[in-house]
Amino acid sequence: MKKVIVMMLLMGIMLIGNAAGELEIFSWWTGGGEEEGLLALFEEFKANNPDVKIINAAVAGGAGSNAKAVLKTRMLGGNPPDSFQVHAGMELTDTYVIPNMMEPLTKYFQQWGVMNKFPQGLLDIVSYNGEIYSVPVNVHRGNVIFYNKKIFKEIGLTKEPQTWSEFIDALNKAQQAGYIPLSLGDKNKWTAGQIFETIMVSEFGANTYNNIFKYEESINTDKLDSSLELMVDLMNYVNKDHAALTWQDASRLVYEGKALFNLMGDWAEGYLKTLGLIPGEDFGWFALPNTQDSFMLISDTFGLPKNSPNRENALKWLEFLTTVKAQDIFNPIKGSIPARIDADKSKYDPYLTWSINDFSSKTITPSIVHGSAAPEGFVTSLNDAINILIATGNVKNARKSIIWACEDAGIITD
Ligand code: GAL
């Protein structure tokens, strides 16, 4: 009898021990500068929740090129992770909130006392019908060119290009000196799409770009042609093997001293740092010409799916992500700036300080390719059109495909 009681007590203790349970976090941060920030978050979370077993359900592939499809299948199949990475904007609202797959978080934001700790503009794009649906952990910038300082100097450049003609001049100089002028890795199509969306801001201007994606102004002007032509021109300067490389491979060419420039979101800054480069010393940065006054916004957020298997733990995770501590651990590593307005700015390197200053003073243009400005179907069609354009150089056909995609998405074309 005694034995049975002891056994029951032991089992009870084991159950209580397990009561903290699991926490499955889904993302696409698996390495090459992306994983480090996530793991640092896990470590800090575990320090406060030692009994919670974190399951890292990351699926490799930059910008969620594989993860997004896996996530959708899981969500539609009623098998959601406890919490998952999702971009602020239409990727969140259109794909998951409107189809009723997410829990609103407004009341928790209130409980956690963080309603006024995020820029209103950012809260607006993680909200739908007055309810907040995810926690922004960062703000990335998309219209940045990183460059190898040694090559820059060696080929006689003295100042960062401000205009397109200065930029093209620098590309030519790099080419003549035998370097890759602009590294690209579009094995996953979004990287070329990202170059194109920043060219669109450069050509249309930030306000018109924004109006197009607010369904207020037409995309169907000669700026669409000039954007496509510029894209084709730039392809004369990229590495021949671009279609075989990932974004990390392309950034690595700058690190290895083979390429002068790389246009990439500033997760590349996180990556270059994990490779050991020092921002401002080994590599520099500037905004793509004509986009200096705008900030191409990408924001990673985490949400709470309905029927999250470990809901309590998911809420603990989300609360943790709202804290200054979590944001200041994650972002300096990730190469992004904190979404919270009251983070400790002294923790951020010179590049990130530049980005923090620009975020509060430039026109915000939400990224298409990274899920903020347009619905997923449009993003896929745009990426396809740009990749065919790169292969064929056929501006007319690319234009036609983009206009069709716009018509499907309700973007004004007349
Ligand atoms: C973006 C994401 C970034 C980074 C990048 C490359 O979509 O917002 O955090 O992960 O993809 O994978």
Image: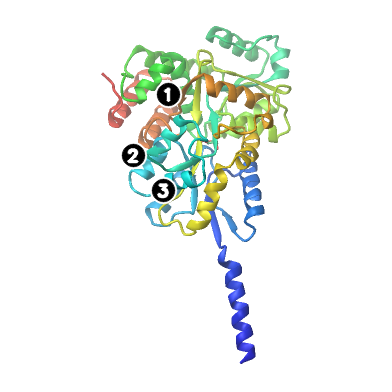
- Picture quarter containing residue 336? top right
Q: Quadrant of the N terminus?
A: bottom right
Provide residue 39's location: percent of width, then percent of height.
Answer: 64, 47
Foreground: disc 1 or disc 2: 2
Foreground: disc 3 or disc 1: 3
Question: Which mark is first along the chain, 2 or 3?
Answer: 3
Provide residue 142's location: percent of width, then percent of height.
Answer: 53, 26
Disc 3, SS? helix
Write down the residue under mark 3: 72
Question: Which mark is first along the chain, 2 or 1?
Answer: 2
Q: Nearer the viewer, residue 35 or 46?
A: 46
Residue type at numbered disc 1:
Leu
Question: Which mark is first along the chain, 1 or 3?
Answer: 3
Return the mark for residue 389.
Answer: 1
Q: Which residue ends up furthest to the left in the rendered image?
A: 414
Residue type at numbered disc 2:
Asn
> Residue 76 vs residue 181: left or right?
left
> Residue 121 vs residue 59: left or right?
left
Distance CA(mark 3)–CA(mark 2): 22 Å
Distance CA(mark 3)–CA(mark 1): 28 Å
Return the mark for residue 129.
Answer: 2
Distance CA(mark 1)–CA(mark 2): 38 Å
Disc 2, SS? loop
Query: Considering only vertical position in the picture, is 201 above or below 17?
Result: above
- Who's the residue at 38% across and 56% down the image? 77
- Who's the residue at 43% across and 51% down the image? 305
Provide residue 26's location: percent of width, then percent of height.
Answer: 52, 49
